[in-house]
Amino acid sequence: MVQAESVCKNFGALQVLRGISLEVQHGEVACLIGPSGSGKSTFLRCVNHLEKVNAGRLRVDGELIGYRERAGKLYELSPRDAARQRRDIGMVFQHFNLFPHRTVLANVIEAPVLVKGKSRDEATVHALDLLDKVGLAAKADAYPAQLSGGQQQRVAIARALAMEPKLMLFDEPTSALDPELVGDVLAVMRDLAQAGMTMLVVTHEMGFAREVADQLVFMADGVVVERGNPRAMLEDPQHERTKTFLSKLL
Ligand code: ADP
Ligand code: MG
């Protein structure tokens, strides 16, 4: 579902991604870990068209992201084609970014109605089902400010799912939450994983990585240092940098 081959991204002279290579299979959950500044968010942003890669190939479901390749040359996708690719990818951020002046339900149906052209009725039925799945059916008419951070994050997940994405990206979805609210959000993510969603998750919740992820990816300085089975990697990391990082984390 995700295939990165030597993906590079720089901001001016700063080389942030220096040849990221990884694969995430259909239905797999991959957790991405690594020191702050190692390029985890930038990588997710490249997958979701928020940044453009400078070199290498990034594919989602077999399609090159942001570019079209013809006779070995890359051409930028039209905004329309890029938008079509983006529609299939859901993203959840550390800060939930809900529209504060709209109800929970209005937040969830916005994109399906505006971007996908669904009828309000159809979008509402789907949204209420999703809100039920994240445990917030009773909050459909509440405003974001009336919810806890964990509830807002679960709304953000429902909002992303409302677009029926084939891939979900999570960028430290629980790091802004009070500790007692983290579990509910992780439980929703676990359910989603069990339902077969392909997920790429930046998180330092090692319990989640161990129990839910099929793959753990350790990034440092813009490269993938090590990736593999989470349990095996946590118990017996192969690289010195991974060892050092994990020992600080656990
Ligand atoms: P991580 O998520 O692993 O903490 P990031 O991907 O956010 O790392 O950042 C990696 C590096 O790229 C950092 O040094 C950061 O300052 C830099 N960076 C990220 N976005 C930009 C940007 N838009 N312009 C310039 N530098 C950026
Ligand atoms: Mg980050």
Image (cartoon, rainbow, N blue to C red):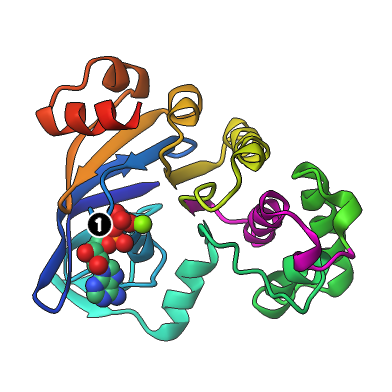
Q: Quadrant of residue 142?
A: bottom right
Q: Is residue 52 visible?
A: no
Image-based side of 69 in relation to 107, left or right: left
Q: Quadrant of ligand 2?
A: bottom left
Image-based side of 219 in relation to 173, left or right: left
In the rendering, at what x and y percent does residue 213 appear?
44, 30
68 is higher (above) or lower (below) than 24: below
In the rendering, at what x and y percent does residue 23 appear?
30, 42
Image-based side of 148 in relation to 2, left or right: right
Task: Report the span colored magenta.
Answer: 141-170
Q: Is residue 221 visible?
A: yes
In the rendering, at what x and y percent does residue 127 appear?
80, 58
Q: Is residue 161 magenta?
A: yes
Residue marked by disc 1:
37
The quadrant of the picture occupied by the C terminus is top left
| Residue type highlighted by circle 1 | Gly
Q: Residue at x 80, y 72 (%)?
A: 106
